[in-house]
Image: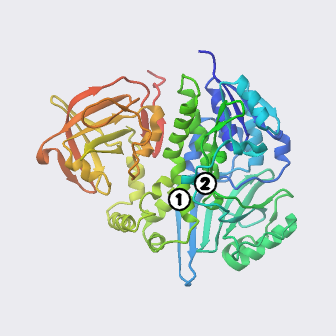
């Protein structure tokens, strides 16, 4: 098959990352940008682009860090929330791995130049619908990652996933130099009023402080409408910090703008759109990143979402050998939505509302329970970690009880988890059926126990909502995931009734068997206490293999908190 030809319209973080990855996989790529690299460097700031661990892993796999100057590490999170009754909660915790923020005026030009070096065609054009028609006629696939030029109108709003009809925050972004900076992501909240988050970053002039203030429309932080110049913006920022975030006012008292383009103000309505756009000719194109999932910036998820969308789409393109039709486009977006964007969107939309009593309780507990503080900080990297305990009072109560028990244990749980994570494992989805309903959960505890008889075991957390179904069922299937099925690992590792939505199942009697895995094992649970062992905060299930299939392929690997790919050792 000749190389697949892909046009990417929009050269933000998502578009440039996707183009770079496609070129590394042998695709022919046209990347359309509305500005040259030099115009971007000389322009205004575009975002805070705080990039956390999971997204940085994607960039590292594509060699992006080697294209950029070193950026300051963000190694801690300091969180502070104040309520209208005068109470507050605060915690300070290390991040699992450093985050970073590189000014897009530095990053995007570097990626554009890398795309050209790898043989990609970079076209400078403010593309409209006619331009996309032209690209669609000459490429196998067109991916739209910019809404400019009326392109966003190609993608209908998904009303069921879009709860808001107006902006929920006004936002002001500022890049400062001369402040008292350290390696901390500071997130401060005035409940019901707005937020301020700051972090060290790298801009065109070198290290800087990045400040984002978001405010409820019409509230005390919605004070930017009459600001017209960078100087007025800076003066208003210092006023806002002194009035509402005094610790940041003190830390940044002597700071000034890094350059004339160091400010940005605005607001937009959070929206989710359908991923397939239809051109006037009838040709269909695929939407990506902010075009189809536009979240409010208050949780600083924009950079994560952009880079992760590029990773999901890259996997989908390079592992597909048929036509890029509407069904494929829907599946590609569905994998991204279920595996990543759904969680970031749900959490961000929820954060736009005043905190509920159980959420206030969790934030208060974080000040004294390191596991709670670490989970919140890690959630900024991967919002799946807020599900379900952030949204449900009963789940919050259970989570806090679990964390109190962990804190009373003999070891530091964070360090023990890090140590145990050094053992690399495969990733499985274990499934069963009970009372006619399908159940499944992700597990990397699967292991072979015996060949004669053929026995396997796996473990489920006692906190899992699906545990009762597995305890009641007398059979289960272990599905060993392939390298391109990491979205299924995420999908089945969270609670909810739609875990099987969009999942292709192989014809099978008994427990459901997933298509596309490198192996699956259908097992009968051993009878009585032999098949179920109570083990601390988990339950161990032991089963005898009754049927299996192993078509093989590249497996999904999990090591040190990340999905990995298996490669042959160079010495063997």
Residue 193's disc is: none
Q: Is residue 241 placed above or below 317 in the rendered structure?
A: below
Q: Secondary structure at mark 2?
A: loop
Marks 2,1: beta carbons within 8 A: yes
- Residue 66 in view, yes or no: no
Residue 142 is drawn in which quadrant? top right
Q: Nearer the viewer, residue 414 or 223?
A: 223
On screen, residue 129 versus residue 522, left or right, reads right
Q: Position of residue 5 (x, y in %)?
A: 67, 24
Q: Quadrant of residue 245?
A: bottom right
Q: Is residue 343 above or below residue 325?
A: below
Q: Tell me the residue at 45%/30% (across/down).
A: 566
Q: Tell me the quarter of the image containing the C terminus.
A: top left
Q: Going by the image, does 349 lie left or right of 548?
A: right
Q: Quadrant of the N terminus?
A: top right
Position in image of residue 330 (x %, y %): 54, 37
Residue with the most extreme top position: 1
Closer to the camera, 125 or 326? 326
């Amino acid at each position: 098959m000749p190389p697949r030809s892909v046009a990417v319209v929009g050269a933000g973080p998502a578009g440039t990352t996707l183009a770079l990855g496609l070129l590394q996989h042998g695709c022919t790529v046209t990347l359309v940008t509305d500005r040259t690299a030099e115009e971007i460097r000389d322009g205004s700031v575009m975002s805070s682009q705080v990039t956390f661990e999971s997204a940085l892993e994607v960039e590292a796999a594509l060699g992006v860090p080697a294209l950029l100057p070193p950026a300051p590490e963000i190694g801690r999170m300091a969180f502070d929330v104040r309520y209208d009754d005068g109470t507050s909660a605060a915690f300070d915790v290390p991040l699992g791995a450093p985050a970073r923020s590189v000014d897009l005026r530095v990053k995007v030009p570097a990626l554009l130049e890398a795309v050209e070096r790898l043989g990609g065609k970079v076209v400078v054009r403010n593309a409209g619908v006619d331009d996309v028609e032209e690209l669609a006629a000459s490429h196998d696939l067109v991916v739209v990652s910019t809404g400019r030029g009326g392109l966003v109108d190609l993608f209908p709003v998904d009303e069921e996933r879009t709860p808001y009809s107006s902006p929920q925050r006004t936002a002001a972004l500022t890049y400062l130099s001369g402040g008292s900076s350290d390696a901390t992501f500071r997130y401060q909240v005035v409940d019901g009023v707005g937020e301020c988050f700051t972090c060290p970053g790298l801009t065109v002039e070198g290290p800087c402080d990045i400040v984002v203030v978001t405010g409820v429309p019409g509230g005390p932080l919605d004070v930017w409408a009459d600001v017209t110049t960078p100087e007025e913006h800076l003066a208003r920022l210092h006023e806002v910090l002194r009035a509402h975030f005094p610790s940041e006012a003190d830390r940044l008292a002597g700071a000034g703008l890094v350059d004339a383009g160091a400010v940005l103000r605005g607001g937009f309505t959070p929206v989710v759109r359908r991923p397939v756009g239809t051109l006037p000719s009838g040709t269909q194109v695929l939407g990506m990143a902010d075009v189809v999932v536009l979240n409010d910036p208050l949780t600083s998820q924009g950079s994560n979402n952009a880079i992760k969308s590029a990773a999901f789409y890259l996997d989908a393109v390079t592992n597909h050998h048929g036509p890029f039709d509407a069904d494929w486009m829907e599946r590609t977006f569905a994998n991204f939505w279920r595996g990543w964007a759904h969680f970031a969107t749900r959490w961000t939309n929820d954060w736009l509302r005043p905190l509920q009593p159980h959420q206030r309780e969790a934030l208060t507990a974080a000040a004294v329970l390191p596991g709670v503080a670490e989970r919140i900080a890690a959630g900024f990297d991967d919002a799946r970690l807020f599900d379900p305990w952030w949204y449900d009072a009963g789940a919050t109560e259970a989570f806090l009880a679990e964390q109190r028990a962990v804190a009373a244990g003999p070891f530091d749980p964070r360090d023990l988890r890090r140590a145990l994570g050094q053992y690399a494992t495969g990733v499985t989805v274990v499934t069963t059926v009970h009372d006619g309903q399908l159940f499944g959960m992700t597990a990397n505890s699967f292991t072979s126990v015996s060949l004669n008889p053929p026995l396997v075991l796996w473990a489920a957390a006692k906190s899992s909502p699906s545990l009762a179904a597995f305890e009641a069922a007398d059979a289960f299937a272990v599905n060993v995931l392939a390298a391109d099925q990491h979205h299924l690992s995420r999908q089945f590792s969270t609670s909810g009734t739609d875990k099987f939505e969009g999942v292709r199942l192989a014809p099978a009697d008994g427990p459901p068997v997933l298509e596309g895995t490198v192996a699956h094992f259908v097992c009968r649970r051993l009878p009585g206490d032999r098949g179920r062992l109570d083990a601390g905060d988990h339950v161990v299930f032991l089963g005898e293999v009754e049927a299996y299939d192993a078509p093989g392929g590249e497996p999904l690997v999990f090591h040190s908190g990340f999905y990995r790919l298996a490669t042959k050792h160079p010495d063997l």
